[in-house]
Image (cartoon, grey):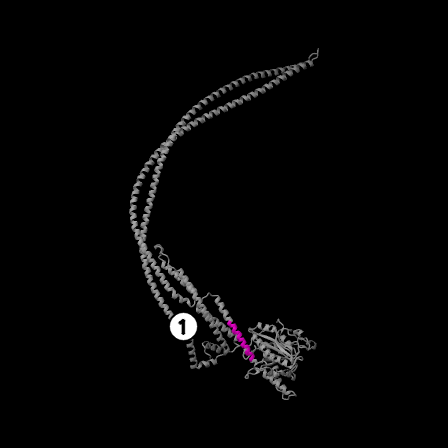
């Protein structure tokens, strides 16, 4: 288990006038540890004994560890004063074990008085007291417990009918390094044998027997455990806590385990005079004992316990009061004020039950029943005063809220303005009733408490009857006014209808004349349109013929131009060809002349004077001459071709002249025809222009006539539309007249229904007033019954208790818890059983 030893009760030496004085103090670490488990019950295990006997080893074994409390091999005590383990050991779900280790008794460093005080405090605070010693029980062992003789001098019960043994813990004597043969006895039998008075006492025999008697007297529940030496080696024995647990002797291990079992099975929660101590009470009791010792007195067990219980009761009472206020405030914070009185009372009962249950749980084993009843009475008085205060505050809040909501309703729930019959719906009363129902539902949900019904019954009925009276009077006034205006309107409608009939007859005759005149104009317009279209068609055909003739002449002129251009091109080509032939002919002539000249030169060069010409030369000459003749013929032909060419040219010139003359002639004909056509066109244009002007003039006259007729037609259309509107208005008037008649009948029926509803509301009001009066009487009876019921019940139960003794006998036959429950039930009605 994690933790460490912490000082619990420290011893401090102070210098006084009388010498050195030892002061006992509770260490702050111990106070903090105990306050951390303030509400848990405690079982206190104290280990005491002579110095250097291994007390701390036993404490470490309870912690399931080898080390914890200081254990050492020297003769100096390792535990100063009283020490606690910093972590409580859980025993069960409600109880923790506090492990205490005391400084060795008979310390060489301290006087006997301090040992006695430490021994006394250890016994008073312990649930189980373990006395540890080495060896068997002998006279020295008895002497080591000689402090029990002085217990009555250092501790006072505070009551004559109580003995110290009732407040002392279970005593467990642990004998370490035990080596005697018990000869069949158990350790418990051996303890009882050793505590018997010796028949042949020695010099101090009587004193030793007194110690034995005191042990038997003070420790009614006692037992013994014998443990052999853990190891045989003396050198290792001094450091036994450092040894491996499994290396120790099995007999020793078994005895230690038996010690642990007896501790955890047999240790009871610390009780004093039937009161089980919590950690907080244990701390306060320790402070009481320490204060008594430091002041030079002795601890008064019951007096100290009473002071602790009273302080615990005061703290618990304040805690419960604070808890009540907190729970009440937390519960109300989740709700919206104001509240119903029954809600506050129910909440008070609910929290009261929780507070009393918590009081019973926390004080069950601490405070006696009379004190619990006194605390409950004080709590009940506080809670009742708090309830009355809250009821008064709630009453003010309820009154304020009820007035605000009712005033807001009165301001908004106004009689509607009824301008005419159309503003009166058949569902008017139903809608007003629904509005009131919504307000009533809202009021009942929001407003709670004293003023909820009081203000409603005082203000709402009178307001509603006044409201509906004004509403019905307003409806009647609107219907009367509407009836009168409807009668006037009917008279005016009849007069207007007669005037309208006369107007319709006049308009119908006027419309007939306009239609007749319109038909005549329409016929004349159609005839004029047909004539105009016919003349336009003729003029259009003549114009198209002239245009076709102009196009034909233009086409012929174009053809002549193209033909003339083609002839010019042919003449130009022939002239070019003639020039090329002339050039070729001149070239040939020059070549022939050159050839003849060369031939002559060659003839002269080949034939020398006096030399005869050979046959070959003659032949060549002939050939040359033949060629010359051929060339001559060629040139003659060419010359002839040239003459033919001249003739051809002359013909071409002649042809050109003819063509030119023909073109000139065609141009003159074209000009004459064109001039003639221009003149004809001019005449046609003048004729068309005259006709067009005449046509435009006639068209203007027709347009003027048409406009006049169109205006008359539009006027006729307007008259016709006006007539239709008048007819429609006449129909609407007739329809509205019928609707007014129907509405009048319906309104009369609605007024009759309103009258019936008013009679029903009046009867409902009377019923509500009767029920309200009945409820008020019932409420007063219930209040009086509620006030007198506890007194009646109390007196009846007292009479039953006096008359029937079986109840008292039955109370004796049940257990303490059942008796407590029955007493609480009677106490709630003020009867102490």
Q: Is 307 within the magenta? A: yes
In the rendered image, the vertical position of residue 833 relative to residue 534, given as above or below: below
Q: Nearer the viewer, residue 817 or 825?
A: 825
In the rendered image, the vertical position of residue 691 relative to residue 446, given as above or below: above
Q: Is residue 307 left or right of residue 487?
A: right
Q: Is 450 within the magenta? A: no
In the rendered image, the vertical position of residue 578 relative to residue 203, given as above or below: above
Q: How dense is the environment of label 1, judged by Cα within 10 Å: few (below 14), some, or many (20 and up)?
A: few
**The magenta segment:** 303-321
Q: Nearer the viewer, residue 805 or 35?
A: 35
Q: Position of residue 757 (x, y in %)?
A: 33, 61
Place residue 5 in its image quadrant. Answer: bottom right
Secondary structure beneath dot 1 equals: helix
Q: Position of residue 23 (x, y in %)?
A: 63, 78
What residue is rendered at 60% in x and 16% in y?
635
Is residue 317 among the parts visible in the rendering?
Answer: yes
Q: Is residue 375 left or right of residue 4?
A: left
Q: Position of residue 707 (x, y in %)?
A: 36, 37
What residue is rendered at 40% in x and 74% in y?
785
Q: Quadrant of the N terminus?
A: bottom right
Is residue 438 among the parts visible in the rendering?
Answer: no
Q: Which residue is mark 1?
A: 783
């Amino acid at each position: 288990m994690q933790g460490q030893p912490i000082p619990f009760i420290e011893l401090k030496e102070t210098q006084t006038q009388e010498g050195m004085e030892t002061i006992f103090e509770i260490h702050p670490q111990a106070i903090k540890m105990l306050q951390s488990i303030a509400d848990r019950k405690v079982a206190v295990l104290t280990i005491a004994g002579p110095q250097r006997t291994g007390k701390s080893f036993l404490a470490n074994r309870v912690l399931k560890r080898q080390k914890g409390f200081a254990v050492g091999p020297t003769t100096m005590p390792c535990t100063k004063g009283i020490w606690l383990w910093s972590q409580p050991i859980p025993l069960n779900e409600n109880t923790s074990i506090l492990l205490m280790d005391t400084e060795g008794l008979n310390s060489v460093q301290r006087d006997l008085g301090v040992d006695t005080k430490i021994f006394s405090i250890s016994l008073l605070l312990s649930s189980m007291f373990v006395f540890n010693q080495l060896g068997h029980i002998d006279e020295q062992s008895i002497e080591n417990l000689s402090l029990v003789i002085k217990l009555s001098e250092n501790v006072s019960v505070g009551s004559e009918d109580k003995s110290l043994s009732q407040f002392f813990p279970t005593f467990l004597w642990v004998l370490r390094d035990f080596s005697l043969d018990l000869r069949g006895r158990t350790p418990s039998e051996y303890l009882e044998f050793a505590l018997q008075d010796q028949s042949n006492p020695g010099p101090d025999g009587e004193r030793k027997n007194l110690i034995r008697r005191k042990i038997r007297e003070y420790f009614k529940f006692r037992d013994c455990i014998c443990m052999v030496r853990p190891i045989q080696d003396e050198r290792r024995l001094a450091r036994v806590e450092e040894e491996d647990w499994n290396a120790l002797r099995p007999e020793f291990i078994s005895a230690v385990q038996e010690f642990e079992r007896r501790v955890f099975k047999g240790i009871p929660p610390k009780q004093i005079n039937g009161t089980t101590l919590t950690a907080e009470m244990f701390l306060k009791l320790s402070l009481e004992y320490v204060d008594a010792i430091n002041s030079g007195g002795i601890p008064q067990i019951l007096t100290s316990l009473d002071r602790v219980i009273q302080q615990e009761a005061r703290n618990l009472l304040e805690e419960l009061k604070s808890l009540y206020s907190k729970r009440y405030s937390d519960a109300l914070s989740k709700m919206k004020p104001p509240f119903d009185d029954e809600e506050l009372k129910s909440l008070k009962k609910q929290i009261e039950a929780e507070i009393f249950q918590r009081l019973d749980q926390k004080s069950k084993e601490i405070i006696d029943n009379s004190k619990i009843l006194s605390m409950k009475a004080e709590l009940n008085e506080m809670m009742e005063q708090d309830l009355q205060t809250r009821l008064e505050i709630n009453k003010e809040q309820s009154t304020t809220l009820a007035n605000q909501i009712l005033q807001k309703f009165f301001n908004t729930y106004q009689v509607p303005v009824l301008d005419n019959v159309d503003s009166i719906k058949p569902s008017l009363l139903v809608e007003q009733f629904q509005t009131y129902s919504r307000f009533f539902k809202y009021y009942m949900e929001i407003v709670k408490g004293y003023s909820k019904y009081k203000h409603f019954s005082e203000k709402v009925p009178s307001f509603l009857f006044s409201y509906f009276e004004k509403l019905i009077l307003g409806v009647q006034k609107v219907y009367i006014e509407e009836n009168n205006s409807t009668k006037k309107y009917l008279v005016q409608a009849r007069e207007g209808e007669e005037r309208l009939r006369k107007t319709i007859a006049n308009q119908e005759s006027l419309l007939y004349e306009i239609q007749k005149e319109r038909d005549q104009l329409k016929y004349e317009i159609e005839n004029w349109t047909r004539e105009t279209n016919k003349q336009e068609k003729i003029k259009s055909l003549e114009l198209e013929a002239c245009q076709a003739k102009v196009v034909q002449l233009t086409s012929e002129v174009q053809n002549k131009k193209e033909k003339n251009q083609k002839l010019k091109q042919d003449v130009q080509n022939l002239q070019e060809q003639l020039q090329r032939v002339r050039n070729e002919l001149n070239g040939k002539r020059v070549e022939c002349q050159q050839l003849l000249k060369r031939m002559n030169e060659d003839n002269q060069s080949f034939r020398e004077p006096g030399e005869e010409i050979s046959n070959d030369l003659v032949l060549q000459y002939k050939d040359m001459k033949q060629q010359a003749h051929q060339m001559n013929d060629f040139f003659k032909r060419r010359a002839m071709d040239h003459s033919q060419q001249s003739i051809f040219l002359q013909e071409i010139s002649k042809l050109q002249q003819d063509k030119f003359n023909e073109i000139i002639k065609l141009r003159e004909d074209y000009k004459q025809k064109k001039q003639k056509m221009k003149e004809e066109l001019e005449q046609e244009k003048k004729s068309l222009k005259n006709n067009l002007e005449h046509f435009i003039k006639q068209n203007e006259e027709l347009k003027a006539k048409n406009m006049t007729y169109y205006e008359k037609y539009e006027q006729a259309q307007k008259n016709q539309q006006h007539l239709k509107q008048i007819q429609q208005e006449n129909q609407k008037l007739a329809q509205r007249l019928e609707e007014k008649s129907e509405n009048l009948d319906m309104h009369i029926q609605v007024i009759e229904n309103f009258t019936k509803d008013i009679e029903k509301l009046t009867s409902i009001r009377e019923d509500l007033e009767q029920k309200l009066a009945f409820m008020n009487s019932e409420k007063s009876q219930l209040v009086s019954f509620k006030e007198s019921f506890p007194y009646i019940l109390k007196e009846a139960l007292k009479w039953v208790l006096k008359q029937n003794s079986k109840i008292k006998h039955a109370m004796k036959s049940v257990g303490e818890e059942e008796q407590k429950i029955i007493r609480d039930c009677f106490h709630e009605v003020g009867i102490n059983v």
